[in-house]
Amino acid sequence: MTRISCPKLSQKVTTADVAAGFINHGDNVGMSGFTGAGYPKVVPGALAQRIEAAHARGEDFSIGVLTGASTSTEMDGVLAQAKGIHMRTPFQSDPTLRKQINSDEVDYIDTHLSHLAQQVWFGFYGNLDVAVVEVSAILPNGLLVPSSAVGNNKTWLDQADKVIIEVNEWQPREYEGFHDVYYGTKLPPYRNPIQILDPTQRIGDPYLRVDPEKVVAVVKTHAPDRDNVFAPVDDNSKAMAEYLIDFLRHEVRAGRMPKNLLPLQSGVGNVANAVLAGLQESEFEHLTAYTEVIQDSMLKLLESGKLDAISATSFSLSGEMAEYFNDNIESFKGKILLRTQEMSNHPEIVRRLGIIAINGMVESDIYGHVNSTQVLGGQMINGIGGSGDFARNAFLNFFVSPSAAKNGAISAIVPMASHVDHTEHDVHVLVTEQGIADLRGLSPSKRAKVIIENCAHPDYRDRLTDYVERAKASATGRLHTPHILEEALSWHTKFRDTGQM
Amino acid sequence: MTRISCPKLSQKVTTADVAAGFINHGDNVGMSGFTGAGYPKVVPGALAQRIEAAHARGEDFSIGVLTGASTSTEMDGVLAQAKGIHMRTPFQSDPTLRKQINSDEVDYIDTHLSHLAQQVWFGFYGNLDVAVVEVSAILPNGLLVPSSAVGNNKTWLDQADKVIIEVNEWQPREYEGFHDVYYGTKLPPYRNPIQILDPTQRIGDPYLRVDPEKVVAVVKTHAPDRDNVFAPVDDNSKAMAEYLIDFLRHEVRAGRMPKNLLPLQSGVGNVANAVLAGLQESEFEHLTAYTEVIQDSMLKLLESGKLDAISATSFSLSGEMAEYFNDNIESFKGKILLRTQEMSNHPEIVRRLGIIAINGMVESDIYGHVNSTQVLGGQMINGIGGSGDFARNAFLNFFVSPSAAKNGAISAIVPMASHVDHTEHDVHVLVTEQGIADLRGLSPSKRAKVIIENCAHPDYRDRLTDYVERAKASATGRLHTPHILEEALSWHTKFRDTGQM
């Protein structure tokens, strides 16, 4: 059965090369894709070839790329290799692109994932010239069935002058009914309350809309999403998961949280996987998730019956799990809702629902300022993603990391963070394999004590305590968050120069 | 006419000394008060005497103090002088208390003003033992007419075991009808959308409720709020105001904002005063404000007809203007609504209404990380206040400061901020008397250029450019936000050691 049943749009079916021809040097292009799911599979590659040919002719050719979040080699990878990206937002994880960002060849704007769509509507990024959006089908009336990620697709389709659609037959046709695309957004001063009271409550449509007049090309593809493989749960991750789940138990016992907790948000990565695996073994039942991304472990939690339902904006599955999901998609219907990332990460909803937010970190300083994005003050890893959307507005937030990295050469607890993404005003609980630091209601000097004692690696604990004591002795009149400014970043410079903090 | 017409509560009328007797060592006390308005006038003084007497007897006596925001000498001042405060949140501005915070005698938890009420409900601060709340009248049925600030009073009255009410006859009896106290708040997962669509839309009650059984004392007072005197608008403030207003004009012309702008939020201070004074002279009409605090200049803007209406949580007037307002209060009815600070600063409303947020700063670094709270990495000034609530969720935010302080000894633009309260992800526009830096959609290295060129003081511009260039040359592979970590905080240490950056 054809996936493209709209007479008007089926006339636009063409090749990736022809489609890529609609994208010009200097264009701002809104691409689908969020954590390696739902990105366009072939137009970026064709565009990269076009860009390389232009460069070979001595012509300038580069574009601004706006997405949902990270994509994959077939998109960010090929475009970056072709030196075809001059501006990129809001999140990425491609090695080639990352290198270009860190050599200042690409202007990277690291943006809260709930902010980008509205900022494009507000006009902060100028005109959006083209949208390139993957879907799983086009209905007879021209409505689009989204694929494995919604991301910012609604905004790209609404805002772009020209639209290129990729219809990916690898994505199940049965995705119809899994999405909730909210068309009630407006610009201030005309905005209304977003009436979500429950993680998987529907407030929108199951389809994306597009003005057929704007569609310049429809391209058929058959290609899988990125294979998101994670390392098996190691001892450190298991320890962190146990501390975290025990803490939740403690909060329930103290009457601060319902027995089935509150909706979970979990960042991508090994610790998140371990926490979800830990919940699988726990006594908790009827859990829900209001999150960005559905990983393998979250899907398993849903299948096991521990988790009742998931709201997200995207999948991020291993190849194996994606096959399993695609083969059994009907059994997940009604339990999973994919929303626009404006809604999945919306401060209004996150605060209202009272999310439990679990996110990774690069480092935390002794006073609880968290670095989520950069190494040594200037080297971008991926980006802040949704961690700020969730942490700031959460009922309770956790930042997790092993206490040391690179065989102990790097401490995750440092005197002063070399970049701050989450300020001391926003951080509730830190977790490492050493233990848990509950910072709620604590002054900075009390935070320092509990962070060092509970979370720092034993190899670094004495030096951290020594730093705090000397800071207190030397910073008379500045004892709210005492620092020795000459030394505050010396752990980072030592690591830079010697490979060891 | 008596201000206390409830038979049950009028039996509780007593002296400040007796009332203070209900407060014990170790208690958590929720006090009214926001930016020097609506704080209890006499019970804190009586309590301070009680504390001093206990100390003279060799007994421990100190309390935790939770308020709306800053208060005055009669509250924070006397309690701090008596060494009676061991914990303080969420904001303060008292010189004695500030000294104790900076000598680590007081645990100060610097909290977003929209977060504290819910965090107390969540149980993050333990039990609330006593509430001490100023009102302007008690009705026959026991409902309370709030005075010049609402702040967190609803939460203190709901949560505290014991309640002490001060009825201040200096506050106009005619305050009845000026407030909107929202009783629809619930704990997750039972929260509902907050149905505010318009700055001065009513969603609550004009009165505060209190369980009469909990009221242990009612004390009559007759004392003015703090006299909030500001320096007259100086040349620097005027220049900043002109840049900012011109920028708003530009945004309207570009079609990014309606002709009557969007609801204004303005922090307290001289620049805010100057901006509001500048708007008075401008072509803008039918303005509205959704803000924390009503200053003299905002009240003047309302009276002049430029501003249609104001939603806030508190006044912060000069003595002279307070007298004028009190004498003419009836003429302001219907144009001013005082809400709880949970609502005045609520992320949900701030994002929905699309606020234009204008806040002061201590310093910004070259990449747009803003320090709002601390000097030299550790010395607390006042606190973050509502700047985070508004800036993060605003349609457009401005951070303003003169480019240099202390006769040029301090630059407001530095290589690296010595404390970060607003991250690069959250800052839209910087304003100094030198000019304006529009950071929207710019990568960090482009931000550095525009911040240095447009906002830095000429005396510091070359050194900042030199820093950036040397950072770029030395930080190969870390060029997203290049830094020389050894030197990043050297401007601060130089100022500390020599009095000059």
Image (cartoon, coloured by chain):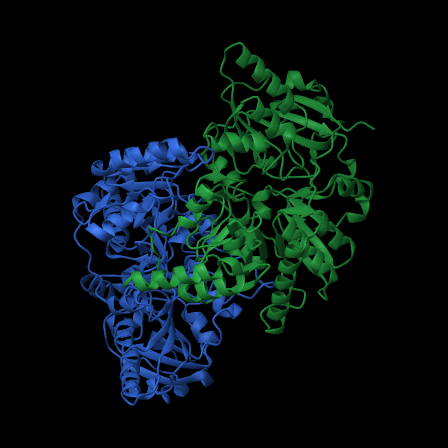
Chain colours: A blue, B green
In the image, residue B408 sits, relative to residue B251, either above or below, namely: above
In the image, residue A168 sits, relative to residue B268, either above or below, namely: below
In the image, residue A246 sits, relative to residue A287, either above or below, namely: above
Q: Quadrant of residue A98?
A: bottom left
B48 with respect to B489 (left or right): right
**Residue A69 coordinates in the image, percent (x, y):** 35, 64
Quadrant of the image containing the N terminus of chain A: bottom left
Q: Nearer the viewer, residue B493 or A91?
A: B493
Q: Is residue A279 visible?
A: yes
**Residue B108 coordinates in the image, percent (x, y):** 48, 34
**Residue B7 coordinates in the image, percent (x, y):** 74, 23
Q: Nearer the viewer, residue A258 or A405?
A: A405
Q: Residue furthest front?
A: B498
**Residue B159 coordinates in the image, percent (x, y):** 54, 31
Residue at 62%, 33% in the rendered image: B32
Q: Is residue A116 visible?
A: no
B168 with respect to A195 (left or right): right
Q: Quadrant of residue A457?
A: top left
A370 with respect to B272 (left or right): left
In the image, residue A273 sits, relative to residue B466, either above or below, namely: above
Quadrant of the image containing the C terminus of chain A: top left
Q: Nearer the viewer, residue A498 or A345?
A: A498
Residue at 64%, 66% in the rendered image: B246
A444 with respect to A494 (left or right): right
Residue at 30%, 80% in the rendered image: A43
